[in-house]
């Protein structure tokens, strides 16, 4: 095969302005080279909610939550009548039990929650006999079976909890729990701060040994750093991520030689914004019967699912939907910092409604207005709610990029809440562990400040980044498929 090998690097929460600064100050030479040799976009739109599991699923499948079925970071699974918590914070995981939270994150997210009706990029490439590889990433579903690794004392301990094998890419390294071969690399079970170096270690080993055609290189530590110290501290963590990419380049004979043999795509799954105040959803819904973290309750009316700068509220008895949804919206919008409340109306076309201080807006799929993705919509009510500009039958929003398409997809996710909430800039919902990142950074909202990420590519992808085009996370899979000569997915 004469085509280049491809590395897809996902840098969690990379903020475009911070990447600019890191490049300008000489602290991101690897990404600078990728941009110079290829192209750089600084407004690639995340999924909604702009939290990692939802965005990771869009990066891995090329579709939105309506089709990949991952609704949020914390959500209510109707089938099992229980909460799913992927680890919003240490204390949030603790509230639901670590074993359960880890089992949901490590196993069930891929095996049960991620829709079987969509293929991941690993599955498509595995079917085409492309040599796939992945470092620790939330979405790993592939066609190759991997047993739990048993190498160190730590993993032997983990193996008492994590027993089941999984289906992953051909070469698969997930914390120290799965490792398709012996390498000198250790991740201390994926503790924050050592995850990037584990990816870089595994990645450079795979480059040296020529073990992949496609590698998903996950670099998550920037997100943790930015949650703690705020998005404007990202230059340091982006420099650290860049060093891991550089490490792969050196393993491939130096940057120039590496890029002669490898195409590279670098993408942020979402951005982050500064948090100044928390929103206490639990206090706001104090007079309601809320399903407790630990389990069942005969009286419970609703499930509350805060996820950073987004939240979802579920009506447990769907027959009560009509009566409860308007009350939920009123209760939520009365809380300081809640920007948008989004729900489906009773209209047979599945009309969507968005309410805020600016009024109410309703929209449906199909109509005269065309968005930047080429989708058609009809919209009525207060356009100011989503800051929509409808000049010349085009519909755009600079404040809430791809607003209609993202909300439509989020509402159509099979396990979405009845009411979705998006926070104003500066605010974050307290999670189930009652923690927030006040003084630090967060993400999750529909607002551009959380939603615009960077997308860089060289050695693959279009020659022209088309300045008018609106890039989204859904564009990554098509780029990868095209690179390996696979037909576009339907
Ligand atoms: Zn995050």
Image (spheres, rainbow, N blue to C red):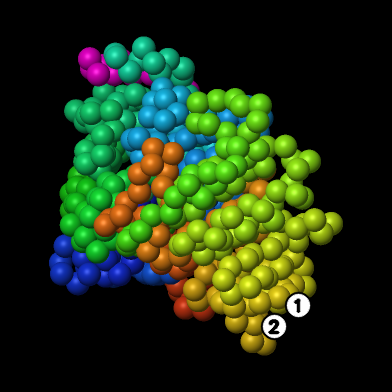
Where is mark 2, residue-wise? 393
Please tell me whether residue 145 belongs to the stretch shown in magenta: yes
Work out which residue is located at the far front of the displayed protein and give it: 287
Q: Is residue 174 left or right of residue 238?
A: right
Q: Residue 173 location, x and y as percent?
A: 34, 31
Q: Who is closer to the viewer here, 243 or 143?
A: 243
Q: Give the residue at x 42% y 30%.
A: 95
Disc on the earlier residue, 2 or 1? 1
Q: Residue 193 location, x and y as percent?
A: 22, 41
Residue 368: give its label.
1
Work out which residue is located at the far left of the displayed protein and give it: 26
Dots 2 and 1: beta carbons under 8 Å? yes
Asked if the residue at label 2 sits under 8 Å from ligand 1, the reply is: no
Work out which residue is located at the far bottom of the displayed protein and give it: 392
Q: Give the residue at x 65% y 38%.
A: 301
Q: Residue 357 location, x and y as percent?
A: 57, 71
Q: Who is closer to the viewer here, 36 or 81?
A: 81
- Asked whether residue 468 is in view, the answer is yes
Q: Residues within 10 Å of mark 2 (few under 14, many from 20)?
A: some
Q: For residue 458, what is the image quadrant?
A: bottom left
Q: Is residue 117 left or right of residue 103?
A: right
Q: Give the residue at x 56% y 77%.
A: 387
């Amino acid at each position: 095969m004469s085509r280049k090998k491809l590395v897809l690097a996902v840098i969690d929460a990379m903020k475009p302005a911070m990447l600019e600064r890191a490049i300008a100050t000489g602290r991101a030479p690897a990404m600078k080279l990728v941009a110079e040799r290829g192209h750089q976009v600084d407004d690639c739109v995340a999924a909604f909610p702009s939290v990692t599991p939802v965005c990771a699923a869009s990066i891995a499948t090329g579709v939105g939550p309506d089709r990949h079925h991952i609704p949020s970071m914390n959500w209510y699974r109707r089938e099992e009548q229980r909460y799913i918590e992927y680890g919003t914070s240490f204390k949030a995981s603790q509230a639901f039990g670590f074993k359960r939270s880890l089992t949901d994150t490590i196993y069930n997210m891929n095996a049960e929650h991620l829709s079987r009706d969509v293929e991941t990029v690993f599955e498509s490439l595995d079917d085409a006999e492309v040599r796939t590889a992945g470092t620790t990433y939330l979405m790993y579903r592939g066609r190759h079976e991997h047993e739990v690794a048993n190498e160190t004392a730590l993993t032997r301990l983990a193996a008492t909890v994590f027993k089941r094998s999984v289906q992953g890419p051909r070469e698969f390294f997930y914390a120290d729990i799965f490792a398709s071969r012996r390498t000198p690399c250790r991740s201390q079970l994926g503790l924050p701060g050592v995850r990037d170096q584990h990816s870089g270690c595994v990645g450079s080993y795979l480059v040296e040994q020529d073990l992949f055609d496609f590698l998903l290189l996950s670099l998550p530590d920037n997100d943790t750093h930015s949650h703690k110290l705020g998005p404007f501290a990202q230059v340091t963590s982006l420099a650290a991520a860049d060093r891991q990419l550089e490490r792969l380049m050196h393993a491939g004979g130096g940057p120039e030689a590496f890029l002669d043999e490898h195409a590279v795509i670098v993408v942020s799954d979402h951005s982050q914004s500064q948090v100044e105040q928390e929103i206490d959803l639990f206090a706001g819904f104090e007079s309601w019967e809320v399903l407790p973290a630990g389990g069942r309750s005969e009286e419970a009316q609703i499930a509350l699912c805060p996820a950073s700068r987004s939240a979802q509220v579920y009506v447990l008895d769907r027959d009560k939907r009509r009566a409860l949804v308007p009350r939920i919206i009123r209760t939520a919008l009365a809380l300081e910092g809640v920007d948008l409340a989004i729900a489906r109306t009773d209209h047979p076309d599945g009309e969507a409604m968005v309410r805020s201080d600016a009024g109410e807006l309703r929209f449906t799929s199909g109509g005269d207005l065309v968005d930047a993705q080429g989708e058609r919509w009809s919209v009525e009510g207060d356009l100011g709610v989503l800051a929509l500009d409808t000049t010349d039958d085009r519909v755009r929003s600079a404040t809430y990029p791809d607003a209609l398409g993202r909300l439509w997809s989020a509402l159509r996710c099979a396990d979405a809440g009845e009411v979705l909430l998006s926070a104003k800039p500066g605010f974050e919902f307290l999670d189930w562990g009652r923690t927030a990142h006040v003084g630090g950074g967060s993400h999750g909202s529909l607002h551009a400040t959380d939603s615009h990420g960077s997308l860089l590519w060289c050695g693959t992808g279009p020659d022209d980044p088309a300045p008018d085009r609106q890039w989204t996370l859904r564009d990554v899979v098509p780029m990868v498929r095209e690179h390996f000569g696979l037909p576009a997915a339907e």
